[in-house]
């Protein structure tokens, strides 16, 4: 190919940066330009805040098959078993690759990697950098991105639409439309290949461990452009977010804390996980989150307690310095004080449907990381498998990208409209967003009922009728852009949940019998 291959990456977290680095590394003299479009700094991405680590079968006592088995068990058979096998198999190689780039992971006294244990894992297999693994991986990738001249980052770009051309089998993605958040200009960026790596949609719910930018942008744009989705019913709630009573982003207390010995107890002192699951406090997340929810309903409290006493103050502060600092900010000393915790929206297991190379159903469009659904996770995600996926699939996507036929030079970016940002926040947008997150939390959260799902859909319809006319007047505030995308994802999650007739993984239907009935197990899975 003598033309320059033009690639746009939307989202500058770990999946997006890793893809860019891998693609550039594979260029081998071919001409390439990669633009990473980002609406916020990497410090505001979910991956930067990832505490736990990267799950990988790193030692002889932990064969791949066991990691595969745990992934399938937590996903309750809704995973794509081939994707699970290939991602798990590549785990040790990506860890070695990161170490080669200079990443520091914790080691034991003998120099071997220290492996943490998290929920759903029957073995300790989480490679980590204390409780700041995301930050460490971002550090090394960001350095590589800076060192590679063909990669450029364009900040303050809020991408609002995918651009496609052609019809039927010839339709392909040719770029994106974005609002420049500094100038308010609407800009069209063209490319031969577009990569969505926009992260999740935790902002659908009142409490989330995700940062403010987790508004489902990539999934929403993909759906509007007609891309297929998969497994949208499955939203993972992390069992232990630090309770503050304030809606929005809540601090995470990593599952590795329970892996190190902390235990969940109700406010009356009752062990939350006693008799619930053979893996106790380290059961799969949907089981633990549901048990906490049930305990909260039973006691009327808005949280349960995490007792880190078995870890001790000194060890806690050494192994979990980030979480200790978070607790200190609320006047708590882990190991001495009981920590009030509650479940919070954490991870969208579904997303734009991709193959194991990150290709969506629209030619020229890839999706990577949390906005994608490769089939790895199934109906619930095994802890620390998301960073693994964000390291493995982009590498495969980069290999495939070089097979792209670039038929002509992609036109440069062009401004198509000036000054489209609303001068003042529109009041109704704030109220509508609060109504949406409330409906999603009440009806599409940890415990669902058919009538509740239907009621959430009515709320979504009603908000759409009020808000979309404001969008069409073409004065857009960032909050309006977010709400427009959240509505698309909310509808997709809710409709997918209505199409799941029995409880599976994170999708728990309370009717006809409340709680305690065995989970349905659907081998093979289906596509929403
Ligand atoms: C955690 O550290 O508990 C979160 C890690 C993950 O979501 O995989």
Image (cartoon, rainbow, N blue to C red):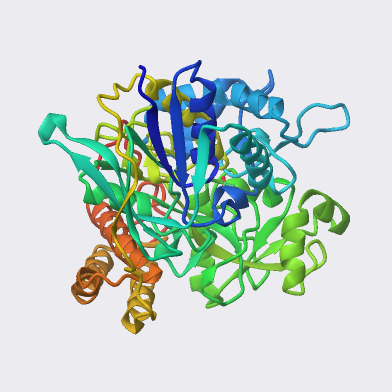
Q: Is residue 8 left or right of residue 306?
A: left
Q: Is residue 336 above or below residue 21?
A: below
Place of residue 161 in the rendered image (x, y in percent of width and height, measured from the top left)? 28, 52
Q: Is residue 115 left or right of residue 233?
A: right
For the N terminus, the quadrant is top left
Q: Is residue 128 left or right of residue 226?
A: right
Between residue 425 and residue 205, name the one nearer to us: 425
Place of residue 495 in the rendered image (x, y in percent of width and height, measured from the top left)? 23, 56
Place of residue 242 in the rendered image (x, y in percent of width and height, measured from the top left)? 63, 66
What is the residue that sits farthest to the left in this orientation? 167
For image coordinates 31% across by 31% down, the residue present is 524
Place residue 484 in its image quadrant.
bottom left
Place of residue 352 in the rendered image (x, y in percent of width and height, measured from the top left)? 32, 42
Q: Is residue 68 visible?
A: no
Q: Is residue 178 above or below residue 77?
A: below
Between residue 321 and residue 236, name the one nearer to us: 321
What number of labels is visible? 0
Between residue 519 and residue 447, name the one nearer to us: 447
For the C terminus, the quadrant is top left
Q: Is residue 432 visible?
A: yes
For image coordinates 20% across by 69% down, the residue present is 472
Place residue 102 in its image quadrant.
top right
Q: Is residue 92 above or below residue 506?
A: above
Q: Is residue 30 left or right of residue 269?
A: left
Place residue 239 in its image quadrant.
bottom right
């Amino acid at each position: 190919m003598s033309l320059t291959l033009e690639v746009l990456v939307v989202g500058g977290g770990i999946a997006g940066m890793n893809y860019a680095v891998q693609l550039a590394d594979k260029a081998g003299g071919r001409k390439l330009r990669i633009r990473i479009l980002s609406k916020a700094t990497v410090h505001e991405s979910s991956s930067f805040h990832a505490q736990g680590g990267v799950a990988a079968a790193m030692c002889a006592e932990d064969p791949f098959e066991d990691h595969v088995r745990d992934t399938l068990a937590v996903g309750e058979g809704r995973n794509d078993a081939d994707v699970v096998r290939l991602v798990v198999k590549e785990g040790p190689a990506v860890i070695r690759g990161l170490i080669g780039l200079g990443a520091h992971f914790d080691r034991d006294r003998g120099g071997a990697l220290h492996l943490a244990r998290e929920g759903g894992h029957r073995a300790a297999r989480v490679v980590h950098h204390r409780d700041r693994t995301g930050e460490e991986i971002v550090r090394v990738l960001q350095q590589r991105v800076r060192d590679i001249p063909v990669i450029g980052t364009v900040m303050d770009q809020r991408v609002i639409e995918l651009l496609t051309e052609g019809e039927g089998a010839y339709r392909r993605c040719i770029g994106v439309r974005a609002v420049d958040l500094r100038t308010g200009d609407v800009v069209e960026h063209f490319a031969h290949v577009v990569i969505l790596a926009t992260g999740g949609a935790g902002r659908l719910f009142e409490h989330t461990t995700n940062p403010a930018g987790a508004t489902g942008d990539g999934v929403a744009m993909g759906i509007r452009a007609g891309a297929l989705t998969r497994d949208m019913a499955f939203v993972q709630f992390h069992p232990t977010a630090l309770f503050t009573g304030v809606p929005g982003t809540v601090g995470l207390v990593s599952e590795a804390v329970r892996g190190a010995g902390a235990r969940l107890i109700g406010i009356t002192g009752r062990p939350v996980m006693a008799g619930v699951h053979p893996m106790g406090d380290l059961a799969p997340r949907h089981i633990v989150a549901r048990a906490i929810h049930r305990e909260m309903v039973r006691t009327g409290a808005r949280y349960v307690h995490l007792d880190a006493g078995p870890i001790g103050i000194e060890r806690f502060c050494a192994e979990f310095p980030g979480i200790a600092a978070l607790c200190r900010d609320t006047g708590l000393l882990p190991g001495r004080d009981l920590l009030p915790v509650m479940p919070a929206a954490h991870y969208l297991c579904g997303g734009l449907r991709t193959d194991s190379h990150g290709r969506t159903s629209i030619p020229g469009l890839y999706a990577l990381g949390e906005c994608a659904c490769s089939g790895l996770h199934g109906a619930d995600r095994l802890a620390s498998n998301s960073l693994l996926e964000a390291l493995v699939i982009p590498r495969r996507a980069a290999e495939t990208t070089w097979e792209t036929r670039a038929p002509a030079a992609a036109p440069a970016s062009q401004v198509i409209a000036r000054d489209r940002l609303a001068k003042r926040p529109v009041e109704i947008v704030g109220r509508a967003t609060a109504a949406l997150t409330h409906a999603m939390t009440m009806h599409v959260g940890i415990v669902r009922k058919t009538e509740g799902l239907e009621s959430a859909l009515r709320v979504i319809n009603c908000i759409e009728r009020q808000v979309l006319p404001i969008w069409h007047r073409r004065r857009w505030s960032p909050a309006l852009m977010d709400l427009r995308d959240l509505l698309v994802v909310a509808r997709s999650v809710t409709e997918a949940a209505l199409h799941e007739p029995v409880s599976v993984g994170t999708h728990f239907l309370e009717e006809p019998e409340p709680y305690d009935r065995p989970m349905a197990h659907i081998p093979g899975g289906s596509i929403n």
